Image: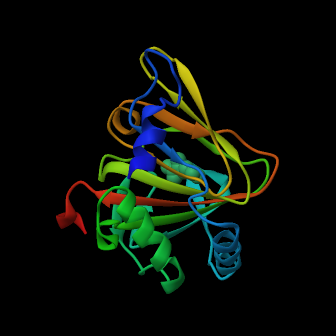
């Protein structure tokens, strides 16, 4: 806990108007855990994302809840595989929740040359969004939609990140395309559990 607070307090951006409530946890998973997860990702049945007639380069697998990108709504889907259990439990601890509170687990594969455009996570999802980044480093950008200010957060491979509060609700985020393949596992709670 002390470690997390230290990461949090050092202010990732050091600027007056930068987004608040972002935590970065370097080396959240070991090289061995990363290797095991990457091996398990080979068993995933990847889905394409089609939005308004365009197919994104990245591929996704939704566990717990499926997400309809055009409607920004969720429906129940298959449970996460067992090999995600320990990562899910550790992610939940970061925000003092139980693994069962993390209703959506999204595994994303970004082939080289792909990223994710500016967006804010759907309102059905709860406050804290947790991500674990694998295989290559990336830069996540946060943009204030009113002032257009942009802040860059370098996320080293094997880190976890959490954004909540101001960063989650008021800022948009994106990940620029990178030169190497990358994977992420993101975990989300629901604002209202009854929509499950
Ligand atoms: O790949 C990541 O780490 C972030 C993904 C993301 O922004 C999202 O799924 O909404």
Give the residue furthest to the front: 2
Residue 41 figure quarter: bottom right
Query: Residue 4, position in %: x, y?
Result: 43, 47
Query: Residue 193, position in %: x, y?
Result: 21, 64
- Determine if residue 164 is in view: yes
Taking the image as shown, residue 122 lies to the left or right of residue 156, namely left
Query: Residue 110, position in %: x, y?
Result: 69, 56
Taking the image as shown, residue 171 lies to the left or right of residue 141, namely left
Residue 29 figure quarter: bottom right
- Determine if residue 120 is in view: no
Q: Name the image quarter holding the C terminus.
A: bottom left
> Which residue is found at the position 62% from the left and 78% from the top?
45
> Which residue is found at the position 29% from the left and 63% from the top?
97
Taking the image as shown, residue 171 lies to the left or right of residue 44, namely left
Q: How is the image coloured?
A: rainbow
Question: Depth check: 151 or 124 in front?
Answer: 151
> Which residue is found at the position 59% from the left and 50% from the top?
26
């Amino acid at each position: 806990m002390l470690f997390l607070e230290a990461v949090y307090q050092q202010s990732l951006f050091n600027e007056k108007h930068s987004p608040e409530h972002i935590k970065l946890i370097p080396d959240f998973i070991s090289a061995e855990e990363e290797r095991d997860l990457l091996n398990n990702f080979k068993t995933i049945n990847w889905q394409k994302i089609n939005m308004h007639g365009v197919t994104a380069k990245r591929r996704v697998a939704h566990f717990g809840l499926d997400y309809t990108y055009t409607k920004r709504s969720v429906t129940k889907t298959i449970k996460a595989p067992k090999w995600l259990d320990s990562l899910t439990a550790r992610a939940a601890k970061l925000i003092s929740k139980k693994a069962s509170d993390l209703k959506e687990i999204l595994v994303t594969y970004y082939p080289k040359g792909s990223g994710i455009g500016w967006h804010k996570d759907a309102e059905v999802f709860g406050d804290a969004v947790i991500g674990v980044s694998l295989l290559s480093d990336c830069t996540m950008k946060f943009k204030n939609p009113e002032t257009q200010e942009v802040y860059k957060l370098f996320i080293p491979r094997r880190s976890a990140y959490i954004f909540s509060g101001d960063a989650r609700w008021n800022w948009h985020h994106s990940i620029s395309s990178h030169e190497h393949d990358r994977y992420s596992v993101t975990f989300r709670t629901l604002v209202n559990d009854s929509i499950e």
